[in-house]
Image: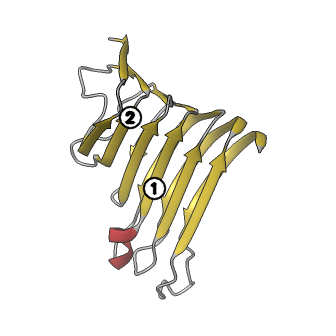
Amino acid sequence: GTVDALVDSMTVGRASAYASGTGTGNSRGTLTMTAGTIDVNTLQVGLQTISGGKNGDGTLNINGGTLTVNTVLELGNATGGAGQATTVGKLNINAGTVIANQIVPGIGGSQIDISNGGTLSTSNAIGTVATPLTSFTIADSTLPVHVVDASAPIVATTLNTGGSQNTINIASL
């Protein structure tokens, strides 16, 4: 379907919190977009709200259309405990476009997969040596890169490439 949304704050895959902070219930959330526009200020994908056994598992599928994140896109933001290891935020761009001011991997898992002509454009670095993306995959897609402060534009534990044509454009130095 087609979506046209202007949102201040959105969370996909948020672990619920008991008042006592106990329990092991896990939360899953998936948002799939095939056409249209989502314009959001803050987007959290895979969120563990308190340290403990619960996790948040979020998946964002951009299969067409444009997602714009004006402030920050957080992937796999975890606070600790047993649920930290299974908290994950996944961004899948399949023929769609994502324009983000900043993408911040959390201490949980964080994955970005771009395929089939998808485009990811971000104004700032993605990941740091201290908190890298868990995995970054690109196949037959475009990645405009903005080099900021001589830092690596993307820091990932695992890099996968595939397909017959990937384009990385140095958009600014």
Which quadrant of the view contains residue 83?
Answer: bottom left
Q: Secondary structure at mark 2?
A: strand
Q: Is residue 109 above or below residue 84?
A: above
Left or right of 57? Residue 80 is left
Q: CA distance from mark 1 to mark 2?
A: 20 Å
Q: Quadrant of the C terminus?
A: top left
Q: Quadrant of residue 11?
A: bottom right
Give the label, 1 or 2, closer to the camera. 2
Q: Please name the amino acid that badge 1 sits on.
A: Gly
Residue 139's spot in the image, x, y percent? 38, 34
Q: Residue at image x 37%, y 35%?
A: 138
Disc 1 is placed on an element classified as strand
Between residues 170 and 54, which one lies in front from this camera angle?
170
In the orientation shown, which residue stands out farthest toward the front?
A: 164
Residue type highlighted by circle 2: Ala
Q: How is the image coloured?
A: secondary structure
Query: Which percent across, then down, holds residue 90?
Result: 46, 52
Is 42 placed left or right of 127 in the picture?
Answer: right
**Mark 2, residues whose alpha carbon is within 10 Å: few (<14), some, or many (≥20)?**
many
- Judging by the rendered image, the residue that carries numbered circle 1 is 89
Q: Between residue 88 and residue 151, name the one nearer to us.
A: 88
Which residue is at a point 53% across and 56% down the rendered structure image?
Answer: 59
Q: Which residue is mark 2?
A: 139
Earlier sequence position, callout 1 versus callout 2: 1
Q: Residue at x 32, y 41 (%)?
A: 127
Which of 114 and 108 lies nearest the eye of the viewer? 114
Query: Closer to the camera, 126 or 19?
Result: 126
